[in-house]
């Protein structure tokens, strides 16, 4: 039985090997379960419209349940190496022939668009689970180190004293934000294309609201052309994935710097380390390079997805749906891998608090605090206080001093040079340059103060619980929809309202 009367022959060997067979293989592996779900929902609609009885419904549902990637294969002669036709062929070759109207008023366009969206929603949910697990691990590591001083950097220079907990709580907050934004993106794309047909809608009274619900969607896509022509939903997902990849890459860059020999702030276990083939003393951490490299793939895929769409007509096309769409699935794979590696690296990292403290004490990271105290306790105008603090640092460095070896008389002399007397300069320096006091001197919410960090981590924990619950609800909606379809196929009386024949085809 032919699948078309419009053209003769079969796909050429080159066309099949380069395009059709690889596409078939991907769809059989990644999209077939979703295609089967769609076919089942369509079958329920045929039954609702009175085009098939329960016996015919059960026969086709049984044939659909047999479909596996191993069962069907690309065949240029039999199915034009098209999975839609391969599925159709499989059902048609059952013991009971399909009812005459099976696949009437149907198109591959909305069928494939719907399958792609179902798969992407599944990938988004899985990625959200990974984000939440990663963020919670980061928060747990942060909770271990709220009191340990370390240098914080601006413009690649040591700037102020912070803590590993303060730094990691920022990564946790960013990850929580990403999980929340992804949830909003998911809800924005949660509209079913099914029932749009080729582009202009369909001729039978398909209940698109019901079909959407049975596939776990919040609602149908309201415009038929948009349903099959637009892949804005893919761009939205890609944007969110690339945004988090950029963030993860930046944090990874810090870990690469801090784990280097010049810092030694962070170490990783031997099972995440690499060696040099020539220099036996080295322990490398290529896992960090892999994370950052894969993050670049995520960003690149987002750009490629946009480039592959931007010059195309606003209509259904394989250039948009399949050629451009491949970048989204590559992006999912790259970010899942990067996230898994980052999760393992941070879960097993050792933070060398001794080296961090030593770096704090070897610099003058409390100079900002010193300027503040000169103003608030000694009455020195703020800008002059800044000048005095900076001049003290310069003079102390010239004498070979550090923050750990303050010199009160030197501060007093510098202040007098600028027209001010400073009472108790030793106390001023002790209260400003001490590394432990530096992490507690901050009082504003969201600061590096241990209590502020603990408060942020507690709020993040509540946030993770909330967003986890929201994602769980979305997953349960999808699972319940699939179970509902199977129940309806087996017994239409389980939902008499849904099986109403009102609006049925003549």
Image: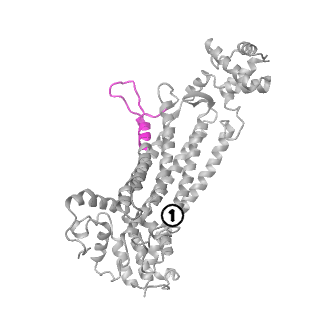
Q: Is residue 232 magenta?
A: no
Query: Residue 271 in magenta?
Result: yes
Q: Quadrant of the N terminus?
A: bottom left
Closer to the camera, 242 or 89? 242
Count of marks overlaid on the render:
1
Residue 394: horizontal and vertical position, in percent?
63, 16
Q: Image quadrant of residue 227?
A: bottom left
Q: Return the residue nearer the eye: 292 or 208.
A: 208
* Residue 175 position (above or below residue 469): above
Query: Which residue range is magenta in the image?
Result: 267-294
Provide the secondary structure element on which disc 1 rests: loop
Q: Is residue 279 left or right of residue 172?
A: left
Crowding at mark 1 (Cα within 10 Å: few <14, some 14-19, many 20+): many
Residue in the picture at 56% in, 55% down: 468
Eyeballing the image, is 415 above or below 244?
above
User: From where the camera sits, is residue 253 visible?
Assistant: yes
Q: Residue furthest bottom?
A: 506
- Residue located at (68% from left, 40% from top): 452
Q: Which percent across, then down, holds residue 171?
A: 56, 42
Res. 126 in view: no
Q: Residue at x 56, y 30 (%)?
A: 155
Colour scheme: one colour
User: Residue drawn at (33%, 74%), measured in percent from left and top?
Assistant: 63
Is 348 placed above or below 391 here?
below
Looking at the image, which is closer to me, 321 or 173?
321
- Identify the image quadrant of the C terminus: bottom left
Disc 1 target residue: 190
Give residue 286's position: percent from left, percent from top.
40, 35
Image coordinates for residue 388, horizontal then vertical, percent: 71, 19
Between 316 and 412, the residue placed more toward the observer is 316
């Amino acid at each position: 039985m032919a699948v078309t009367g419009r053209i003769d022959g079969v796909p050429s060997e080159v066309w099949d090997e380069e395009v059709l067979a690889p596409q078939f293989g991907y769809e059989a592996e990644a999209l077939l379960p979703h295609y089967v779900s769609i076919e089942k929902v369509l079958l329920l609609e045929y039954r609702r419209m009175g085009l098939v009885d329960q016996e015919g419904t059960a026969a086709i549902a049984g044939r659909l349940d047999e479909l596996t990637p191993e069962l069907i294969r690309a065949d240029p002669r039999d199915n034009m190496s098209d999975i839609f036709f391969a599925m159709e062929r499989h059902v048609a070759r059952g013991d009971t022939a399909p009812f005459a109207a099976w696949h009437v008023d149907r198109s591959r366009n909305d069928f494939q668009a719907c399958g792609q969206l179902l798969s992407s929603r599944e990938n988004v949910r899985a990625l959200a689970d990974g984000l939440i697990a990663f963020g919670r691990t980061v928060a747990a590591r942060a909770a271990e180190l709220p009191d340990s001083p370390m240098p914080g950097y601006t413009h690649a220079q040591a700037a102020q004293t912070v803590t590993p907990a303060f730094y990691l709580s920022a990564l946790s907050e960013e990850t929580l934000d990403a999980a929340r934004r992804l949830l909003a993106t998911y809800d924005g794309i949660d509209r079913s294309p099914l029932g749009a047909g080729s582009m202009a809608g369909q001729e039978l009274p398909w209940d698109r609201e019901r079909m959407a619900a049975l596939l776990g969607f919040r609602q149908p896509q309201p415009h038929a052309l948009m349903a099959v022509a637009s892949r804005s939903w893919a761009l939205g997902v890609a944007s969110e994935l690339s945004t988090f990849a950029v963030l993860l890459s930046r944090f990874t860059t810090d870990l690469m710097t801090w784990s280097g020999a010049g810092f030694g702030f962070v170490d990783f276990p031997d099972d995440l380390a690499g060696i040099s083939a020539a220099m036996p003393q080295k322990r490398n951490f290529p896992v960090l390079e892999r994370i950052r490299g894969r993050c670049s793939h995520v960003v690149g895929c987002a750009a490629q997805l946009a480039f592959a769409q931007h010059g195309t007509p606003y209509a259904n096309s394989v250039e948009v749906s399949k050629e451009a769409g491949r970048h989204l699935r590559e992006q999912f794979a790259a970010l899942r891998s990067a996230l898994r590696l980052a999760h393992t690296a941070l879960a097993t990292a050792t933070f060398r608090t001794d080296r961090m403290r030593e770096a704090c004490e070897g610099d003058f990271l409390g100079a900002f605090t010193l300027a503040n105290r000169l103003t608030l306790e000694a009455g020195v105008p703020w800008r002059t206080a800044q000048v005095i603090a900076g001049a003290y640092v310069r003079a102390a460095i010239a004498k070979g001093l550090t923050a750990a070896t303050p010199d009160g008389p030197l501060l007093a002399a510098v202040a007098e040079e600028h027209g001010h007397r400073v009472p108790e300069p030793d106390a001023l320096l002790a209260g400003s340059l001490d590394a432990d006091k530096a992490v507690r001197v901050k009082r504003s919410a969201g600061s590096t103060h241990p209590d502020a960090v603990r408060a942020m981590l507690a709020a993040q924990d509540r946030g993770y619980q909330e967003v986890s619950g929201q994602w769980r609800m979305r997953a349960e909606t999808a699972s319940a929809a699939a179970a509902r379809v199977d129940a309806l196929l087996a017994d239409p009386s389980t939902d008499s309202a849904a099986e109403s024949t009102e609006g049925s085809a003549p």
